[in-house]
Image: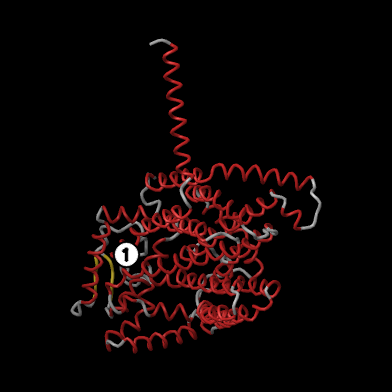
Amino acid sequence: MSKEKIRENYQKIIAAAEKCGTRLAAAVNGISMRNMAAGAAVLFVLSVIPLLALGKYNVMCIDDYNYGMRVHDTWMETGSLWQSVQTAVRQTKDFFVNWQGTYVSCFLMAVCPMNFRYEAAFIVPVIMIGMFSVSAFLFGRQILVKWLGSDNRKASFVMFLLLFMFYQVMEAPFEGIYWYNGATHYILMESLLFLMLTLVSGILWAEKKKAMLFRCIPAVLLGLIVGGGNLVTALQAEIVLALLLAFAYGKKRGKTLYVLLPFLTSTAGFLCNILAPGNAVRASLDTDVGYSAVPAVILSFYYAAVFMIGWTNVFVLFIWSALLPVLWQIGKKSERSFAHPVWVTAGAFCVLSAMFTPTLYAVGMVGLSRVDNIIQMVYYLCLFFVTAYWLGWLSHRGSGKEAVREGRSVSQKDIAEASAGNAFGLFLEKAGNGMTVFFILLVLFVWTLTANKNTYTGISALRSLANGDAAVYYEEAMERYALYMDETVTDVVVKPFSARPALFDFEDLTPNEDNWLNLAVSGYYHKDSVRRE
């Protein structure tokens, strides 16, 4: 074949490839945001189905026994739900005086579903994933739509991708999804905070008094509930509600009372929580020594930065990159001013840092994985919202709106910022859906083909279901349960689990019958002893 013929064929191939690429780009960029949001929703749902399916093999464990013992006894003796609830109330009062002030969490932990039916543990991931994902979605979309000026479809797309990302890289999935006691104390309480903040934010943007009252009443009740949960969430509620109250007083004076009421009930619950007599009793028995107030606050900023770096992995960076064009469009089309990006960034960092303070103050440490779950989610929310705010600021500077709004003449700095904004914005607009789809494909590649199949929760759960680990574990757990319920056996000896899903990484019984967990199980089932071979 002649050189001319080879060159001609090569040019045809290049032309065909360019034509195909142009058509593909046009097709991708032609995907509507409605379809993008629907696709993200499907991706999120598919990613959590294995997590929910693994819940079929869940059982009660760890502190579920300690907190549920008295209610379980009442249920076994009377079969009365009402009397069991009364026992839970009495236990909560006792704990309030003798152990801890988290009155709402203590009550909820006492009424563990497995107290009434051991096989009911499958409902725990349904409750935790359902409550947390729905509340985070509503709260996040409220911020994007009302505060940042997004439309509902873009906001939904962002939140579905964020939730997909969070559940795949969750710091401690067992403690946040499957363990009733730990997830109730943190994940469920944070979910209720998200709902309360959604309602309070809705008050600020409502136009009619009836709508404000409709949101205020449940927000007031949620304030009392959130204040009686874990101190990380309760302190976070105090800070954010105080900021919303200050905003209402400064910008929306007529709505101040409607924001003040939830703040007052939350504060009342928080004070009742931290001033409970049981906290002093527990502190006197606890060997852990916390930092004083000032060092705890200072260290909170340090640890916030450390954990932010650790939680910003490749998976997160790819999702963040995929959302940049969408976040740019949100800011560009928004009527919000985006006038204070530095203050917004500093505020978000302070709120995040404050979530590390309670454990530093109380026990002098961070890294409690069940606590880290909720801090991690708040970080991801802050990451995307602050990014959207900066892009909104940059898009408005690039269009010259900021200088005009501030009544300034256009300076060299304004010109430089406008040029940078225009250049970056032009890149994101040109990249469009193509950039978003490209990075989502990279995410799917990393998600499904990572060598360690336990790296991401959805794949890990699917693996445990497929290889039979979950079924074997549950069968052996039920064999243990049969021994616990056998009244003829007073000293129970159980076999070690031969298989266990990687996500079920909880502490197991030991050969030492005096181990705290062994004692909890033996007390729950009224055995003389329980130990593992």
What amino acid is at disc 1? Gly
The quarter of the picture where the N terminus appears is top left
Can residue 280 be seen here? The reply is no
Residue that sits furthest to the left in the current view: 488
60, 405: nearer the viewer? 405
Can residue 521 be seen here? The reply is yes
125 up-or-down from 443: above or below: below
The percent position of residue 352, horizontal first and vertical second, equals: 58, 63
70, 490: nearer the viewer? 70
Residue that sits furthest to the top in the current view: 2
Kind of element beneath mark 1: helix
The percent position of residue 523, horizontal first and vertical second, equals: 32, 79
The percent position of residue 148, horizontal first and vertical second, equals: 60, 61
Q: How many marks?
A: 1
157, 35: nearer the viewer? 35
In the rendered image, which residue does mark 1 sit on? 55
The percent position of residue 399, horizontal first and vertical second, equals: 69, 49
On the picture, is 316 further left or further right than 389? left
Q: Residue at x 47, y 68 (%)?
A: 135
On the picture, is 524 further left or further right than 346? left
Question: Callout 1: few (<14), some (14-19), or many (20+) C-alpha neighbours within 10 Å?
Answer: many
Q: Residue at x 62, y 71 (%)?
A: 239
